[in-house]
Image (spheres, rainbow, N blue to C red):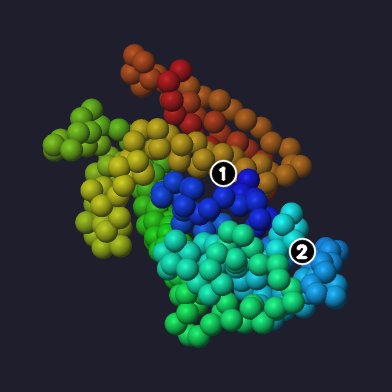
């Protein structure tokens, strides 16, 4: 749509565009506004024994539709160009659409082109207004839906973070050996999230089956991302609290199973005295 010709004398007929593209072309021209080169040096023509030319003051009188073609030295109607195929010939025949109007001696034809309230021109103007309102309505619907989806996502995310924060504080495992929907015990994270949803209508309305398939926030990858973010924020707080103070770290390992090691990382600093515990496969 960026390559649409702006000079009305060089535009193809609106019917030359694919029917699927015509409304998009119309919107593009309406949003750009009529072509009104006010600083152009309008050439003079001889009419009878007088020199006449296009008067740029006409742009002020007919600002919403009057256009001027530099290439054709002619005036055009934007609204009738966009919707003439739907309404038939308007006053002045094809002069304000295809051929262009250039009889500057008879400038009263501009007003006669507008005509009465039910003229072909005013029907075209009404169609232009309806098209823009339709676009604005659709855009408003999209914006409202996007805001609604964002609000739902934040509720789901905060619920997931609350569950993960609880499990981290208690040092409880997240995953279950069977996390399928038919499982009687899907693991601590999913069961805790379900418990929260069962006791909170706001969470229940947006979680599990009520959530879009791609943003349920229940997958192991999502859990790990939130845990990683929590670890990063925790480390940031520890660093900020220690500041420039001297500190010591003592790493203590203990085997829990054949494949699992527990690693405790106590940090001592004045005035800070805290223990940061990390668990994982070692």
Label located before the other in sequence (2 or 1): 2
In the displayed structure, 264 sits above or below 34; it is above
Q: Is residue 56 visible?
A: no
Real-space CA distance between mark 2 and mark 1, rounded to the nearest whole angstrom? 58 Å
**Left of 79 or right of it: where is 193?**
left
Of the pair 145 and 30, the residue shown nearer to us: 30
Asked if 49 appears above or below 102 in the picture, the reply is below
- Circle 1 SS class: helix
**Residue 236 location, x and y as percent?**
62, 43
Name the residue carrying label 2. Answer: 37
Which disc is residue 233 wearing?
Answer: 1
Query: Residue at point 69% right, 36% down?
Result: 247
Q: Quadrant of residue 143?
A: bottom left
Give percent across and percent down for residue 243.
72, 44
Q: Is residue 99 visible?
A: yes
Q: Is residue 10 above or below residue 201?
A: above
């Amino acid at each position: 749509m960026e390559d649409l010709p702006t000079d009305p004398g060089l535009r193809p007929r609106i019917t030359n565009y694919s029917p699927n593209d015509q409304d998009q072309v119309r919107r593009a021209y309406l949003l750009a506004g009529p072509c009104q080169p006010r600083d152009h040096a309008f050439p003079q023509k001889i009419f009878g024994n007088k020199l006449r030319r296009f008067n740029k003051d006409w742009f002020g009188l007919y600002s919403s539709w009057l256009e001027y073609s530099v290439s054709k030295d002619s005036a055009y109607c934007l609204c009738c160009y966009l919707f003439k195929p739907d309404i038939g010939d308007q006053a002045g025949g094809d002069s304000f659409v295809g051929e262009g109007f250039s009889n500057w001696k008879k400038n009263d034809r501009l007003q006669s082109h507008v005509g009465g309230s039910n003229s072909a021109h005013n029907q075209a103007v009404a169609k232009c207004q309806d098209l823009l309102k339709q676009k604005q309505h659709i855009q408003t619907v999209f914006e409202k839906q996007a805001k609604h989806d964002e609000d739902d996502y934040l509720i789901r995310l905060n619920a997931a973070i609350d569950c993960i924060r609880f499990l981290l504080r208690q040092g409880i495992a997240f995953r279950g050996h069977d996390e399928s929907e038919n499982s009687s015990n899907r693991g601590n994270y999913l069961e805790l999230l379900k418990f929260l949803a069962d006791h909170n209508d706001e969470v229940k309305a947006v979680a599990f089956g009520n959530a879009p398939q791609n943003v349920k926030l229940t997958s192991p990858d999502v859990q790990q991302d939130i845990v990683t973010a929590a670890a990063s924020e925790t480390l940031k707080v520890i660093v900020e609290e220690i500041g420039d103070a001297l500190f010591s770290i003592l790493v203590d390992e203990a085997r829990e199973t054949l494949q699992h090691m527990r690693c405790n990382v106590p940090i001592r600093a004045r005035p800070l005295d805290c223990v940061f515990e990390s668990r994982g496969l070692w």
